[in-house]
Image (cartoon, helix red, strand yellow):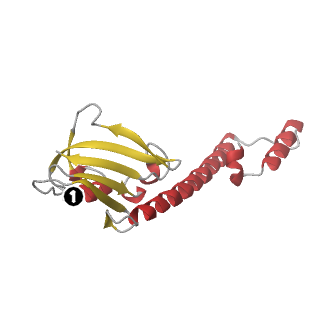
Amino acid sequence: MSQYSPFYDFDVVMENLRDLEKGNIKPFEKNEYQQQLLSFLHNISDYHNRISLEVVEAYLSEIATRETVVEVVPQKVYYEVLQSGNDSVSTLDSNFKMHLIESRVLEGEEVVIKDTRTANKPIAIVLSDTILGFAKGASGMICGERRKIYIHPDLAYGKYGSTGFQQIMIYDVERL
């Protein structure tokens, strides 16, 4: 519970519990305690979103200083070419066969979430069917090219990502 201390005063909570036990105060009605709990959870969610967003923006600021990094959308989408290609250029309506390594930054470390290379099973996509940040970062790739794409949550899943609050998306993509 101490991790949530910015949202309540533990001493006040304990005092209220003692008063409740003694009968000095009445318990909340069901709708009242549900509202209190939802408000509490909303505050926790907002807090974690703010903290995560600060970490993401600091990480992207550091990425942006690298000489090999290309800024596609200011402060939101970046990529670096890991391997040059040799064929046709992709557009947003292009069918795209690729190997993909999907990562997140957790506690300052890049952690792989998904890797099509390990199973040697490339995937096929149409760029316009992907999240906006991925489509922007992969647009213009040529066959054989490999890029590492960094995407701010605003152009990915925002605060509703399946792996946590305001996560940066990192993709290592090789167009086949």
Residue drawn where x is 27% and y is 30% of the image: 119
Residue 24 quadrant: top right
Mark 1 — residue? 139
The amino acid marked with disc number 1 is Ser
Quadrant where the N terminus is found in the figure: top right
Q: Position of residue 168 (x, y in %)?
A: 42, 53
Q: Position of residue 142 (x, y in %)?
A: 15, 54
Camera-nearest residue between 59 and 75: 59
Q: Position of residue 136 (x, y in %)?
A: 27, 59
Looking at the rendered structure, the secondary structure element under dot 1 is: loop
Quadrant where the C terminus is found in the figure: top left
Residue 65 visible (yes or no) = yes
Count of numbered circles on the image = 1
Residue drawn where x is 82% and y is 45% of the image: 16
Residue drawn where x is 47% and y is 57% of the image: 56
Camera-nearest residue between 1 and 113: 113
Camera-nearest residue between 130 and 64: 64
Residue 101 horizontal side relative to residue 50, left or right: left
Residue 31 horizontal side relative to residue 97, left or right: right
Residue 164 horizontal side relative to residue 80, left or right: right
Q: Is residue 175 above or below residue 81?
A: above
